[in-house]
Amino acid sequence: MKNKTNNAAVFALVCSAIALLATIFLVNPTKAPAEEAVNDRDFQVVSALVMNGSEGLYILDKRTGLIAVFLYEPGRGLQHKGTSPAAAAFGGLNQR
């Protein structure tokens, strides 16, 4: 009787493993959408692809007028690349 129970358990585990492997290989994972924007009262966040293939995250603090830039690179993680006034990012359009 124990042998039949063990065989049924092994059969169930093998079927589960096959189903999981089939799911992994047949379902294409979707990447996070780039060039999305989220707007709130105090912050605006935009993600975009960068020229070298990395992904950029731009965070604008509307109260202080500062914009922060972060880059995500596989293997290196999320890195802060700098913070500056938003007006400086557009070549000083507001300055005369």
Image (cartoon, grey):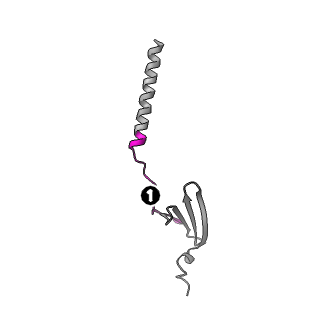
Residue at image point 44% right, 58% down: 33
Q: Nearer the viewer, residue 73 or 67?
A: 73
Residue at 47% over, 18% down: 6
Q: Is residue 62 left or right of residue 36?
A: right
Q: How many numbered discs?
A: 1
For the residue labelled by badge 1, is the local secondary structure a helix, a strand or a loop? loop
Which x, y percent locates residue 42?
A: 55, 66
* Residue 73 sits above or below residue 21 on the image: below
Horizontal and vertical percent for residue 51?
Answer: 49, 66
Tell me the kind of residue under disc 1. Answer: Pro
- Does residue 63 appear left or right of residue 39 in this picture? right
**Quarter assignment of residue 12:** top left
Q: Residue furthest left?
A: 26
Magenta stretch encompasses residue 34 = yes
The answer, for residue 56, to whether it is visible in the render is yes
Residue 71 point in image, percent of width and height: 56, 62
Q: For mark 1, does the 10 Å Cα neighbourhood hold few (<14), some (14 to 19), or many (20 or more) residues?
A: few
Q: Residue at x 61, y 69 (%)?
A: 83
Q: Which residue is mark 1?
A: 33
Is residue 42 at all visible to an observer of this figure?
A: no
Expressed as whole percent of the image width and height from the top left, the position of residue 1 reads 45, 11
Check if residue 65 falls in the magenta segment.
no
- Which portion, as a residue range, is magenta? 23-45
Q: Relative to 68, say whether 13 is above or below.
A: above
In this view, the residue farthest toward the top is 1
Q: Quadrant of the C terminus?
A: bottom right
Q: Nearer the viewer, residue 42 or 57?
A: 57
Q: Residue furthest bottom?
A: 96
Q: Looking at this view, name the residue that lies furthest to the front.
A: 52
